[in-house]
Image (cartoon, rainbow, N blue to C red):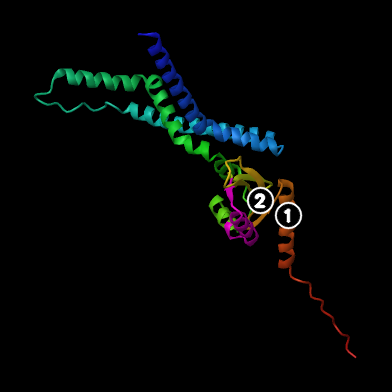
Amino acid sequence: MTRRKRWFYYSIAILAGLSLAYIAFVLFFLDFVVDIWWFHALDYGIYFWMRLLYRFVIFIVAILIFSGIFFMNFWVGARYLGKTDIPSHPHEPKKFRKTYKQLIQMFRTGSMVVYTPLSLILGLTVSLPFFSRWHQALLWVLGPDAGQTDPVYGPAQISALIEQDTEISQKFTLWDQIGSEIQRGKMIILPINNVVYYIQPVYLRAARHLKIPELKKIIVSQGDVVVMDTTLERAFERLKQKIEQRLKRLEIPETKVSIKEPN
């Protein structure tokens, strides 16, 4: 092999390695990097690492629970496996029956060797939704009963409420008319004191220029109340004022009853 061919193959291998590394970064690490930058930009770095810790703790606990369930099922089934003999056939070779008995014996006596890795693989597969939806699992398991009949909105309902809000839709329409591309970031679920808040950043990017999206607004919602402001603190303050105004409108005015003394 000549030196030129060797360098050519090296270049192909390096390009392939860089391509695979780029694909792996986009698929597995891009969201992680964007999230940590966004949380640190809002001075919520501790909250980001707490979310990451909760996610892996819930995922590992789910793996252990489901793996234990699978292992116990395999172990109990193995106690009764091979109790009845396989039906014989006149033309059946003896080697087949011997192999069958050896296989049954391995499953009956090798529980730790056979069932442990199989149970872990099955438990890992079943527990994958707990890794991607850890916040819902945590809220469902540990969330106390609020004793209220009000509906709890999910991300799909909150997105619909955001699109139906008159003020927000007018802003989106205005930005779209001036040629800006609107990008709504990931929706964050933040449970605090039996109240579920939904937070979603809104980015703008000039349609004519390939620029990094600029964080323009923050959407915060509680129940069916949705507000949008420039910072997270201002959005929470505006949400509080909007909820107080709604409660004041719902209050029943006190009626004064005057009793006249008889003449």
Q: Quadrant of the C terminus?
A: bottom right
Residue 238 - label: 1
Q: Tell me if mark 1 has few (under 14), some (14-19) or many (20+) residues whose alpha carbon lies within 10 angstroms of its own.
A: some
- What numbered label is drawn on residue 220? 2
Q: Residue at x 66, y 51 (%)?
A: 220
Q: Which residues are magenta?
A: 163-184
**Quarter occupied by residue 100:** top left
Residue 197 in the image: x percent, y percent? 65, 49
User: Looking at the rendering, which quadrant does residue 92 occupy?
Assistant: top left
Which is nearer the eye, 169 or 235?
169
| In the image: residue 37, left or right of residue 56 | right
| Marks 2 and 1 in Cβ contact (< 8 Å) | yes
Given the image, on which type of amino acid does mark 1 rest? Answer: Arg
Q: Amino acid at mark 2?
A: Val
Q: Position of residue 124 (x, y in %)?
A: 45, 31
Query: How far apart are the two marked residues, 2 and 1, measured between alpha carbons?
Result: 9 Å
Question: Horizontal placement of 247 versus 140: left or right?
Answer: right
Residue found 49% across the figure and 31% down from its top: 63
Secondary structure at numbered mark 2? strand
- Judged from this view, the residue extending furthest toward the front is 4
Badge 1 element: helix
Neighbourhood count class around disc 2 (C-alpha, 10 Å): few under 14, some 14–19, many 20 upward: many
Residue at the farthest right position: 263
Residue under the point 52% across and 29% down: 25
Q: Can residue 194 be seen at all in this image of the molecule? A: no
As drawn, 84 above or below 210: above
Asked if residue 34 lies in the magenta stretch, the reply is no
Residue 171 magenta = yes
- Using the image as rendered, state which of residue 243 and residue 258 is in the foreground: 243
Looking at the image, tell me whether mark 2 or mark 1 is earlier in sequence order: 2
